[in-house]
Amino acid sequence: MYKIILIMTMLITGAVFMFGSNSITFDEKTNKLLKIEPKSENAELYFFNDRLPNDFFERLKSQEKVQLFPPFADRGSWENAKNNRLNKVIVTEIIHQADECLNTTPIELTEEDFYRFVIDGNRTVFEKKYFERRKNLSYLVLALCLTANKEKYLPSIIVYTKAILDEKTWCLPAHSVWIDKKLSPLHQCDLFAGDTASMLALMSSIIGDELDRIETGFADKINQKVIAETFGNLLNTETSELNYWYRSEWPWNWIPWCTSNCIITALLAAPTPELRAEYIQMMLYPLARYYKSFDDSGFSSEGAMYFPMSAGMLFNALEALDKAVPNSTEKIYQEEKIYRMLTFIAGIRVGKNIITYSDSTPKAKPNQLLTALIAKRLNSAEMAAILQGKALNADVLTASQSHRLLYDNLNIFFNYPTQLPESSTAIIKPTLFRNRLAILRTNGFFGSIKGGQNNEPHNHNDLGHVTIYYKDAPIIIDVGTGPYSANDFNENRYTLWYTRGNGHNAPIINGIEQENNEKHYAEIAEITETNGVFSSVCDLKNAYNEKAEIIDFKRELRCGEDFAEICDNLKTAKKTTVEISFFTIQKPIVKKDKIRLGEVDLTWNNINLVRADMEIEEFGGWDEPIYRIVFKGESNSYSFKFTEAK
């Protein structure tokens, strides 16, 4: 029945597949549906094909079945994983969590919870329940494989799997199609529909035989569903256009996130080797668009929080391809821009902290598993330095709590490197992502200044925003983002206090804040050094609309071991007024001519202090209250200096 559905889908789309050397071409109707251009018109679309072995697809087709991780029947591999001393903490936690799920029914996903998104903008109530189902199923599958106790865990696995298969849609409310607040029957393969598909495909590939012993054909039922929700959705003329990530050329996480999930699903669940190869080819095109959208520095406009779901997902996709066809990604990993994209998180590290901007979560920390895997694959000292040059141990390695729990723990059990490249424990030299971000590092003060443009993925109006750290303590912060709601992604986004220019230390010039517009940009050309003091100048004259009447505006950040300084120099067509808000988690203690911020004193010149008090007690990922310090003035030149408190 399922193959009949696939044949019908291909007839509808007019798909006819032809195999070449290291690529597969599709007929005109399929190319039109998926907006695939021939190589003669868009060679960049074939970036990954050109770097795969000429026999890649033939080798992929030659395998009756692809296995990314050991199946349940490979008891030797699972016993080794269970008894590995580095894994013992995780194994204990997984079994404990799985036992908590036994004899419980999957939490109910109600219509009321689903519709809250269009009623009051809340997306967390439904998502918490949605993710709990998948997390619990992952624990049960892992516990089964680790203990081999089929009588104990298989019944609950069947119950949870059927509950997920019976869900009306795997697409989240926030990503669904709504017409006048009514849910359309059409939906896309969004981030989490893809996550669900790849999770179930992984499960089926590992314990499918055990599931079939309880219910004949159950594994095939799972595989049919995951292919229908991914490639069936993409190849359906009614729903194909809804998958806008497939055709996007924006440098954002949707492309590699969805693509990586689809690649894993295709490798494990495609009904034939031929279709497996065809599906993989389909996914190489969006990956190439994603690669093309980055500049040579590898800078990600989405920031630290999205790195695991953006460049990290590109890495996962490449690793899956390399497992399916060993040694097939060598040329891809040799590309300099690929290296920079995959090690970007190391470039924005300052001591024990990560520079955050845009929608990044405050106090964002690198994903330790992903960091270790990339460090090993690329032999990257920079990535290994994040982990202090050695593999994680049982004291700090814990079971993943993410929606990718099954995949992450399989990687911990079977792919985690026992040794990482040699590295130093700190990065002191400055880093410049030209015209995007400058990071100044010393043994005392660290700082960053943000460039770019105000219409990037997950944008905040933050051009010229500065962060300051002193010996790992955050002094002037980027507040980050709050829990997502509908307003984070609709016309009200820039009414939220933390996305506005006023929610950063981007000055308000003549009453005008920065606004969301790609025409508004800031440039950072270089970093200079004089006697151990590093300096970066951000040109902000094009960062505001014409009502600010800015003729020239330069913001300079200077960092030395014993001080950091922000110097603004601007010229406007009329009398200049400025207002600047600094945010900090250090409780401000105001004295006559300075403010004490933890171990740092802040002084100022040619501008007046207005207030220094609590802005909000709890927000985002900060454990401490956030304070706002406001300055106002009418000078064209003013400055702020941070020094060690005396």
Image (spheres, rainbow, N blue to C red):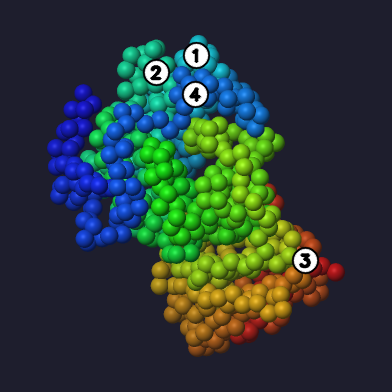
Across and down, in percent, residue 107 comes to 48, 26
Of tags 4 and 2, the one toward the viewer is 2
Residue at point 65%, 77% (across, down): 529
Q: Which mark is residue 141?
A: 4
Q: Report if the CB atoms under discs 4 and 2 are less than 8 Å apart.
A: no
Q: CA distance from mark 1 to mark 3?
A: 59 Å
Q: Earlier in the sequence, mark 1 or mark 2?
A: 1
Give the amino acid at mark 3.
Val
Q: CA distance from mark 3 to mark 4?
A: 51 Å
Of tags 1 and 3, the one toward the viewer is 1
Please name whichever residue, 493 or 94, is drawn nearer the observer in this view of the structure: 94
Q: Which mark is residue 150?
A: 1
Give the amino acid at mark 1.
Lys
Q: Residue 608: which quarter of the image?
A: bottom right
Q: Earlier in the sequence, mark 2 or mark 3?
A: 2
Q: CA distance from mark 4 to mark 2?
A: 13 Å
User: In the picture shown, does residue 137 fall above or below 267?
Assistant: above
Across and down, in percent, residue 152 comes to 53, 13
Label 2, on which residue?
209
Q: Report if the CB atoms under discs 1 and 4 are less than 8 Å apart.
A: no
SS state under label 3 = strand
Q: CA distance from mark 2 to mark 3?
A: 62 Å
* Observer able to see residue 18: yes
Q: CA distance from mark 1 to mark 4?
A: 10 Å
SS state under label 2 = helix
Q: Residue 576: which quarter of the image?
A: bottom right
